[in-house]
């Protein structure tokens, strides 16, 4: 289970999920209880799906900039992972 994340680039990092309802309207909601990842399962964090949102940026991010985040897992503990900054609403096709 992914419990949360931190980054030196922001005051806080939240795990969010974007979903589109039957009315076609997309909404974003935080996942305060974390994200369950089953053994052997791969979970992709991407814009307009499950993603990490950086709040309270300490400095502007540049598109394509790589920054390190610390992901905290229930069993594995803290893991350092590089992420590439993408603009809000970017499509996964532009992910690196």
Image (cartoon, rainbow, N blue to C red):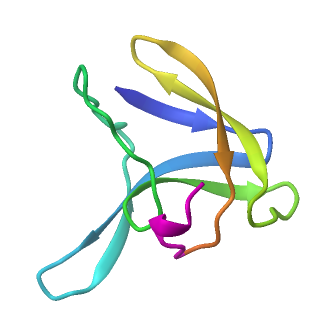
Query: Which residue is rendered at x = 64% and y = 72% of the image?
Result: 87
Quarter assignment of residue 26: bottom left
Residue in the foreground of this view, choosing between 91 and 3: 91
Residue 55 is situated, as x and y percent measured from the top left of the image, at 66, 57
Residue 59 is situated, as x and y percent measured from the top left of the image, at 88, 59
Q: Quadrant of the N terminus?
A: top left
14 relative to 89, above or below:
above
Residue 64 is situated, as x and y percent measured from the top left of the image, at 74, 60
- Left or right of 6? Residue 72 is left
Residue in the foreground of this view, choosing between 41 and 52: 41
Extreme residue toward the left, this view: 22
Query: Which residue is rendered at x = 60% and y = 46% of the image?
Result: 13
Extreme residue toward the right, this view: 59
Quarter assignment of residue 80: top right
Residues shaded magenta: 89-96
Magenta region includes residue 90: yes
- Left or right of 70? Residue 18 is left
Q: Main secondary structure of the magenta part?
A: loop
Q: Quadrant of the C terminus?
A: bottom right
Residue 32 is situated, as x and y percent measured from the top left of the image, at 39, 43
Residue in the foreground of this view, choosing between 92 and 8: 92
92 relative to 84, above or below:
below
Magenta region includes residue 31: no
4 relative to 48, above or below:
above
């Amino acid at each position: 289970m992914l419990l949360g994340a931190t980054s030196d680039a922001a005051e806080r990092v939240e795990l969010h999920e974007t979903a589109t309802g039957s009315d076609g309207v997309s909404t974003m909601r935080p996942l305060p209880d974390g994200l369950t990842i089953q053994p052997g399962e791969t979970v992709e964090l991407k814009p307009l799906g499950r993603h990490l949102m950086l709040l309270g940026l300490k400095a502007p991010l540049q598109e394509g900039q790589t920054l390190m985040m610390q992901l905290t897992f229930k069993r594995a503990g803290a893991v350092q992972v590089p992420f590439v900054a993408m603009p809000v609403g970017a499509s996964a096709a532009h992910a690196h």
